[in-house]
Image (cartoon, rainbow, N blue to C red):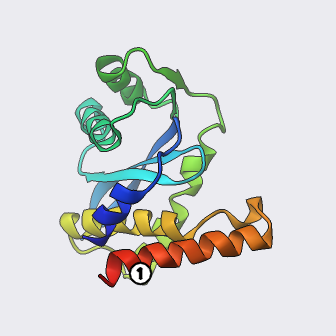
């Protein structure tokens, strides 16, 4: 509930999307965590699925497009062929880049997820992982304003604004 309210009130995300997938184990079964991040490092959305094929990529793209309502200008992925196949089917006019190391922004965004996964002693079910990780990313976006990119007084302003937003959403 909190995350849905934060998503509705957040500003427009960037127009360059970085997409990546990583495996997670849920009760010993391999699942794939698909993640999209914009050029500022803000998580757009995630999806947990059992398979890693063209159908799964199409499902993830549909989720992203439904949640944004605005078309992006460029997507950046690794060289996995299913991204190209899904993009051709759903978004043929969008620029697609697979340049080596350009997708590092999304690769690094998996680190907080791995830390939370270890703290929670792994995820217990597919649904629990989906619910937790989708909220974790939204709240992480709210409280991670990119401190290294700004002066201390601006950082304090954005941090205070984040707490005001959290109070508005959670203490109504």
- Residue positioned 36% across, 21% down in the render: 91
Residue 163 lies, with reference to residue 106, above or below; the image says: below
Residue 119 picture location, percent across and down:
44, 83
Packing grade of label 1 (10 A; few <14, some 14-19, many >=20) is few
Residue 10 picture location, percent across and down:
43, 56
* Of the pair 14 and 112, the residue shown nearer to us: 14
Quadrant (top left, top right, bottom left, bottom right) of the C terminus? bottom left
Q: Quadrant of residue 3?
A: bottom left
Residue 119 lies, with reference to residue 53, above or below; the image says: below
Q: Quadrant of residue 2?
A: bottom left
Residue 28 visible? The answer is no
Quadrant (top left, top right, bottom left, bottom right) of the N terminus? bottom left
Residue 166 picture location, percent across and down:
43, 76
* Of the pair 89 and 151, the residue shown nearer to us: 151
Residue 6 lies, with reference to residue 81, above or below; the image says: below
* Of the pair 118 and 165, the residue shown nearer to us: 165
Report which residue position mark 1 lands on.
Answer: 167
As helix, strand or loop, the secondary structure at mark 1 comes to helix
Which residue sits furthest top? 93
Query: Image check: 144 left or right of 130?
Result: right
Residue 50 picture location, percent across and down:
23, 50
Counting labels gives: 1
């Amino acid at each position: 509930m909190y995350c849905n309210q934060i998503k509705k009130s957040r500003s427009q995300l960037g127009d360059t999307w970085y997409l990546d997938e990583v495996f997670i184990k849920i009760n010993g079964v391999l699942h794939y965590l698909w993640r999209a991040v914009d050029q500022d490092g803000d998580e757009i959305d995630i999806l947990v699925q059992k398979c890693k094929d063209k159908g799964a990529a199409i499902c993830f793209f549909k989720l992203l497009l439904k949640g944004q309502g605005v078309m992006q200008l460029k997507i950046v992925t690794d060289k996995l062929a299913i991204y190209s196949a899904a993009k051709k089917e759903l978004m043929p006019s969008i620029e697609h880049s697979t340049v080596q190391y350009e997708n590092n922004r999304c690769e690094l965004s998996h680190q907080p997820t791995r830390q939370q996964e270890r703290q929670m002693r792994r995820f217990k079910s597919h649904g629990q992982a989906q619910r937790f990780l989708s909220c974790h990313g939204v709240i992480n976006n709210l409280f991670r304003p990119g401190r290294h990119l700004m002066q201390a007084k601006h950082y304090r302003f954005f941090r205070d604004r984040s707490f005001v937003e959290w109070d508005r959403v959670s203490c109504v």
